[in-house]
């Protein structure tokens, strides 16, 4: 595959941008190759600067559930753009998206829009601290909630991918207020939450973990978490930046029937433009300025273009049968992928929730960070490189997720499975 334009762009980018990328995982360091510079996308395909076409399973890390450049989303953005790009004042579109979000997500009475998932989670934690008057945060090993200081403790996503223990620059007196415990371990969870020496404000959790690779909640785990946090007056925050509008229209909380106190959203609700959101019970959200004393602000929050893309996306997601169709497609693909993996490798584990999944090159079950770490990241890297050469664009890390969209056709998935078998044969030994 000719990648000369991407290669020269990468060289040029590294002169101006650290690592040549604006988000670390995109540098493809852990999969042993240089990044392809993507110039355009449409439907399930992306096209690099050399004109190579790929079937895309990154989907911009989740937002593109409809596929790239969906006509209705593009039209909505164009219509909004005709009226201007940013006003720094409330606009009708943010009210419309707020109504859609509060209607869709069972636990959200009120919502505040921000510009990224990180802003959403850091604001939700500040709100939980303001509401409870307590300071400790409990998170889970391998979960990633964005790059705010408080979260860079045994975090997932790029932190695992790059093997960064935490991050320099995060003061000890910040880190000491965050405790990270194993995902899916009810005993450690109960022991930690009942430890009266800890002044716990909140627990933040990915209800389906997507940042150590996909790891599903064990039966009863989220129920236990909800029961304990309710009993102990601890704010339960569901970080649904990935799962929100992905695993169902109402997110994981609707899928599993468990209502958190606060929910963080991002990705899909922006339809590909920069958006995040946090929301929850009116009693808690009422503390947010200007209604209450907990401060949070943002120049471009509620941006009309981003709002218009989110509205157009959610209106299509609301259509009857959308999630059923995506589930049927995803299940069929996953079953075929598992069969191929079993045929060529003894120990491969496929974890899936709806249209988000991870193929671990490791023995299952993979139900927490330590288990995920046993996966063979080097074998994944070989698989990644072979698939890339065959025009299949996977997440450049064993510890991320792959996403299917409404735009992935049966032909796309058949080709992907064909290239998977071809790649498996090549990396088998
Ligand atoms: P952003 O600040 O990147 O918009 O969202 C942070 C975030 C929060 N919560 C969850 C569950 C997330 O998955 C994320 C971001 N996800 C990563 C991929 N796993 C974004 C990709 C990247 O960092 O480049």
Image (tube, helix red, strand yellow):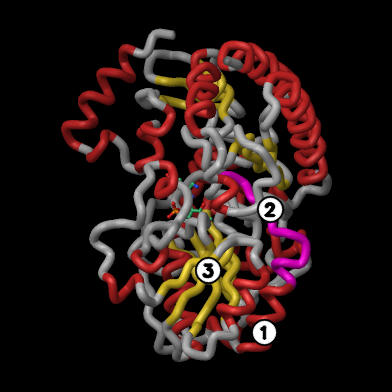
Q: Which residue is mark 3?
A: 278
Report, in whole angstroms, how far the alpha carbon at label 2 lies from the one at label 1.
22 Å
Residue 216: numbered disc: 2
Does 291 sit above or below residue 370?
below
Q: Residues within 10 Å of mark 2 (few under 14, many from 20)?
A: many
Residue that label 1 marks: 230
Q: Quadrant of the N terminus?
A: top left
Callout 1–callout 3 Cβ contact below 8 Å: no
Q: Residues within 10 Å of mark 3 (few under 14, many from 20)?
A: many
CA neighbours of label 1 inside 10 A, class few (<14), some (14 to 19), many (20+): some
- Does the image show residue 313? yes
Q: Residue at x 62, y 46 (%)?
A: 214
Circle 2: element type: loop
Name the residue at 44% across, 80% down: 136
Between residue 388 and residue 322, name the one nearer to us. Answer: 388
Q: Is residue 124 above or below residue 422?
A: below
Residue at the (74%, 71%) spot, across then down: 223
Identify the magenta region.
213-223
Q: Quadrant of residue 207?
A: bottom right
Q: CA distance from mark 2 to mark 3?
A: 23 Å
């Amino acid at each position: 595959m000719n990648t000369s334009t991407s290669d020269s762009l990468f060289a040029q980018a590294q002169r101006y941008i650290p690592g040549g990328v604006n988000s670390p995982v995109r540098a493809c360091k852990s999969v042993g190759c240089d990044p392809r510079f993507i110039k355009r996308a449409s439907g399930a395909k992306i096209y690099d600067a050399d004109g190579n076409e790929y079937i895309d399973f990154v989907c911009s890390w989740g937002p593109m559930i409809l596929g790239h450049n969906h006509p209705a989303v593009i039209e909505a953005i164009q219509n909004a753009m005709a009226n201007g790009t940013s006003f720094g004042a409330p606009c009708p579109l943010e009210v419309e998206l707020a109504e859609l979000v509060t209607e869709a997500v069972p636990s959200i009475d009120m919502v505040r829009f921000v510009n990224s998932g990180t802003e959403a989670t850091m604001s939700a934690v500040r709100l939980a601290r303001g509401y409870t008057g307590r300071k400790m945060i409990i998170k889970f090993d391998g979960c990633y909630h964005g790059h705010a200081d408080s979260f860079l403790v045994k975090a997932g996503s790029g932190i695992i991918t790059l093997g960064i223990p935490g991050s320099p620059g995060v003061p000890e007196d910040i880190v000491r207020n965050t405790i990270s415990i194993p995902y899916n371990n009810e005993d450690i969870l109960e022991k930690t939450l009942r430890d009266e020496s800890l002044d716990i404000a909140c627990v933040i959790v990915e209800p389906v973990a997507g940042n150590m690779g996909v790891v599903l909640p064990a039966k009863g785990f989220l129920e236990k978490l909800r029961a304990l946090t309710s009993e102990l007056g601890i704010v339960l925050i569901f970080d649904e930046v990935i799962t929100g509008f992905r695993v169902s229209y109402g997110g994981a909380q609707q899928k599993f029937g468990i209502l958190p106190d606060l929910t963080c959203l991002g990705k899909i609700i922006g339809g590909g433009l920069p958006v995040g959101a946090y929301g929850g019970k009116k009693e808690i959200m009422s503390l947010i300025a200007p209604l209450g004393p907990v401060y949070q602000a943002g120049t471009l929050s509620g941006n009309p273009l981003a709002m218009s893309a989110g509205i157009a996306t959610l209106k299509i997601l609301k259509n009857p049968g959308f999630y059923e169709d995506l589930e049927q497609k995803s299940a069929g693909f996953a079953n075929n992928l598992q069969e191929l993996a079993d045929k060529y490798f003894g120990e491969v584990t496929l974890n899936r929730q709806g249209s988000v999944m991870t193929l671990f090159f490791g023995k299952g079950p993979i139900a927490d960070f330590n288990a995920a770490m046993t996966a063979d990241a080097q074998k994944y890297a070989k698989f990644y490189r072979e698939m890339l050469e065959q025009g299949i664009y996977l997440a450049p890390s064993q510890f991320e997720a792959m996403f299917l969209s409404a735009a992935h056709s049966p032909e796309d998935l058949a080709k992907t499975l064909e290239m998977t078998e071809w790649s498996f044969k090549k990396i088998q030994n």
